[in-house]
Amino acid sequence: MHHINLFSLIENNGIVELNYLNQDLKRLPQADNIIDNNIKLTLRGETIDQNGRTQNLIHINISGLFFLKCQRCENCIEKKIHITNTLEVFYTQSTLEKLPIEQENFDSIVGSKEYNPQELLEEEILLNLPAFPTHDVCPTHDYYAKTQEVESPFAILKKLKPN
Ligand SMILES: [Zn+2]
């Protein structure tokens, strides 16, 4: 598990590139049999002066393949993801809460010297996933159409019954 010092990343205008295996992203809904694959997370720190104050920013870039379970046929949907976002990082929860709403031009988080970017990664992906993922055209539809032609009507009836 990677931990990074988010504050020094911002102070140094640093860039960090991390790779995560899909299998390790346990909080996310995924297909049953996902293949070995990496999702790349890039974090870039930056400090800007805006609205008469200094803002500590983290620019996020997430890319890779994600494997969702189709809610119609239960097979795997391969989805290319590319997510970018910018977050304002605060040193403490109380400074974050003191920020007037009209000055909130980015989503805000509280940083840490031992920040675990995996939570951030999972949250950003989750926000960008469809609530009800399905294939445009499910791959099994063709398969069923073909097999039903040769099967007895009784077998088809059995198949249509809910569990
Ligand atoms: Zn499907």
Image (cartoon, helix red, strand yellow):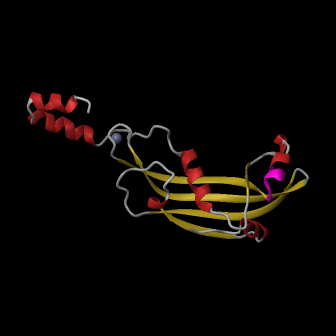
Helix, strand or loop: magenta stretch: helix
Give the total number of marks visible in the rendering.
0
Quadrant location of the N terminus in the rendered image? bottom right
Question: Residue drawn 68% across and 67% down?
Answer: 114
Question: Which of 136/119 is in front?
Answer: 119
Question: In the shown orientation, is residue 57 left or right of residue 63?
Answer: right
Magenta run includes residue 57 = no
Residue at the image position 53 percent from the left and 58 percent from the top: 63
Residue 96, given in percent of the width and then of the height, sits at 80, 50
Q: Is residue 78 left or right of residue 145?
A: right
Where is residue 67? Give x, y as percent: 42, 52
- Above or below for 19 versus 65: below
Q: Quadrant of ligand 1?
A: top left
Q: Quick check: 155 above or below 82?
A: above
Provide the residue span drawn in magenta. Answer: 91-96
Q: At x 63% / y 68%, what residue is drawn?
A: 3
As drawn, the residue found furthest toward the right would be 52
Residue 8, compared with residue 110, is above or below; it is below
Residue 4 x %, y %? 66, 69
**Where is residue 93 drawn, in percent x and y?**
78, 52
Q: Is residue 95 magenta?
A: yes
Q: Is residue 103 left or right of residue 31?
A: right
Examine the image and state in which quarter residue 135 appears.
top left
Give the quarter of the image for residue 41.
Answer: bottom right
Which quadrant does the C terminus fall into?
top left
In the rendered structure, the answer to whether residue 134 lies left or right of residue 40 reads left
